[in-house]
């Protein structure tokens, strides 16, 4: 959904030489995501080979491993901001081949919610189920009553499958945007007008992620209630962050948080967070434990590693502040004025939170959608935006805050809770918190 409106304050535009380009793939050695080399392609799965592989794995001997996978962190000290330095690896991902889902953007005269359901791509669902089954096998033959998988292995398998499906679905979401730039007939639970693209992306992700083995609950910024889809992890999605950028054709994204708890879950219950950025190219950033990896997603859904061990640069150079300036509280206005007066800092604010956060990850700096006099609780959604963005930035060596504490330590009360969001280099967040506490 849309991330917010621009500031009333006049800011200088990007100066010569300050244009923002995507990261380039480093000349790196093999490592990181399993035993693949950096830049190696994940190719779309062949459905028949998947099913043959499933049968082969069913008869595998005890002790045979389909992947070398590290267990997901299960203790709070394994999460960003705590002492233990274990990482949950991104694992070998598999993009799944699928037919284009209404690529021309035609709604066929249907109301997005009240009309007939979107057509189900059964071949896609069968292939996802096969890929998820392969992913889930770790130790010996699998039967209907198999209990050999540990809890952390089961979570890791579900996380892998969710990441695969998000990457596989991203090109279809992008291709479906041109014909869905108009408003839909309805509002989301936060009272914002839905775009047809919001509804399309939400329905598509619910269909696809709901078919993944190990996913128990699907929740979206566009739906009032969570959807029970099985047993396993809870997946929270902002299907199209910054959808107000559809009209000017600016950057947008998809945000996904995977929780090992019922909803509303806490920030320390996140097992992985993902965002897809639909910019000049489509990229995906994945955080698991204290490891952050950036990928480029190809048109067919395959994805290649661009950057392993993403870290915020030590010297911050960009900032982006949301909300109307007349509605900023005095302490934040003073902080913003100091940041703006620093000649080393450049304004980067585009109206889609995930695009602005990606600037901070790339160049170092700070993004804020602050508390406002008209909205003391903030504007962004804790479960769908605050937690996952805080988790990613902290995993990359940065800091997050609601103005008083880490975003991950904010206690949820409702699925659609709002929160102020401040993320960036630790020294900037520390300074901000000190100013707001005065």
Image (spheres, grey):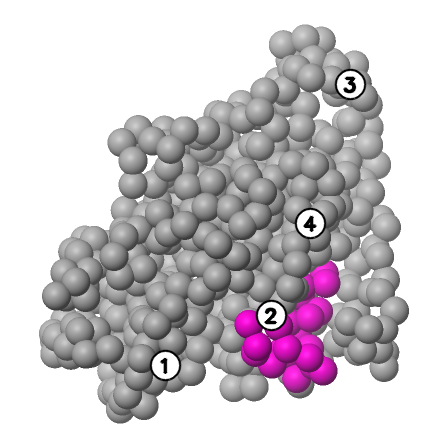
- Kindly report the distance in space between the C-alpha atoms of the residues bearing marks 2 and 1: 19 Å
Residue positioned 38% across, 33% down in the render: 76
Disc 2 vs disc 4: Cβ atoms closer than 8 Å? no
First in sequence: mark 3 vs mark 1: 3
Question: Which circle, 2 or 4, is nearer the viewer?
Answer: 2
Q: Secondary structure at mark 4?
A: helix
| Magenta stretch: includes residue 24 | no
Q: CA distance from mark 3 to mark 2?
A: 40 Å
Q: Is residue 115 left or right of residue 206?
A: right
Q: Which residue is mark 3?
A: 145
Q: Quadrant of the C terminus?
A: bottom left
Position of 40 with respect to 117 (left or right) is: left
Q: CA distance from mark 4 to mark 1?
A: 36 Å
Q: Residue 382: give x, y in percent of width and height.
A: 45, 59
Location of residue 313 by image quarter: bottom left
Q: Is residue 166 visible?
A: yes
In the rendered image, residue 267, in percent from the top left (x then y), is placed at 43, 46
Q: Are marks 4 and 1 in contact (CB under 8 Å)?
A: no
Residue marked by disc 1: 374
Residue bearing mark 2 = 189
Q: Residues within 10 Å of mark 1 (few under 14, many from 20)?
A: few
Along the viewing direction, whichever of 128 and 81 lies nearer the viewer: 81
């Amino acid at each position: 959904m849309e991330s917010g409106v621009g500031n009333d304050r006049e800011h200088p535009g990007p100066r010569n030489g300050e244009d923002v380009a995507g990261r380039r793939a480093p000349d790196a050695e093999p490592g990181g995501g399993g035993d693949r080399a950096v830049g190696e392609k994940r190719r779309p799965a062949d459905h028949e080979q998947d099913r043959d592989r499933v049968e082969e794995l069913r008869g595998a001997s005890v002790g045979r491993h389909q992947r070398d996978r590290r267990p997901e962190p299960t203790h709070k000290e394994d999460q960003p901001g705590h002492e233990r330095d274990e990482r949950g690896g991104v694992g070998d991902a598999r993009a799944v081949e699928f037919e284009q889902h209404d690529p021309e953007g035609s709604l066929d005269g249907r109301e997005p919610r009240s009309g007939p359901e979107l057509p189900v791509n059964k071949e896609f669902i069968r292939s996802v189920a096969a890929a998820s089954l392969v992913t889930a096998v770790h130790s010996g033959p699998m039967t209907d009553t198999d209990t050999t998988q540990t809890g952390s292995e089961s979570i890791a398998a579900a996380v892998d499958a969710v990441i695969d499906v998000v990457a596989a679905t991203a090109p279809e979401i992008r291709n479906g945007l041109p014909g869905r730039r108009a408003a839909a007939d309805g509002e989301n639970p936060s009272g914002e007008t839905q775009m047809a693209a919001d509804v399309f992306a939400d329905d598509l992700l619910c269909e696809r992620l709901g078919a993944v083995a190990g996913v128990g609950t699907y929740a979206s910024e566009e739906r009032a209630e969570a959807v029970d889809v099985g047993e396993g992890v809870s997946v929270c999605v902002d299907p199209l962050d910054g959808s107000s950028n559809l009209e000017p054709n600016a950057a947008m994204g998809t945000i996904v948080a995977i929780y090992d708890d019922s909803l509303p879950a806490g920030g320390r219950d996140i097992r992985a967070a993902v965002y897809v950025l639909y910019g000049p190219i489509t990229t995906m950033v994945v955080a698991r434990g204290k490891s952050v990896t950036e990928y480029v997603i190809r048109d067919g859904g395959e994805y290649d590693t661009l950057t392993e061990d993403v870290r915020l640069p030590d010297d911050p150079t960009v900032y982006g502040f949301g909300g109307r300036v007349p509605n900023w509280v005095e302490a934040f206005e003073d902080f913003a004025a100091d940041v703006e007066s620093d000649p080393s800092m450049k304004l980067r604010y585009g109206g889609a939170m995930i695009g602005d956060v990606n600037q901070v990850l790339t160049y170092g700096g700070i993004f804020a959608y602050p508390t406002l006099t008209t909205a003391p609780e903030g504007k962004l959604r804790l479960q769908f935006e605050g937690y996952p963005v805080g988790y990613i930035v902290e995993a990359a060596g940065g800091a997050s805050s609601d103005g008083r504490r880490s975003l991950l330590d904010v206690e949820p009360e409702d699925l659609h809770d709002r929160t102020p969001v401040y993320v960036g280099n630790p020294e900037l967040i520390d300074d901000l918190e000190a100013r707001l506490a005065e």
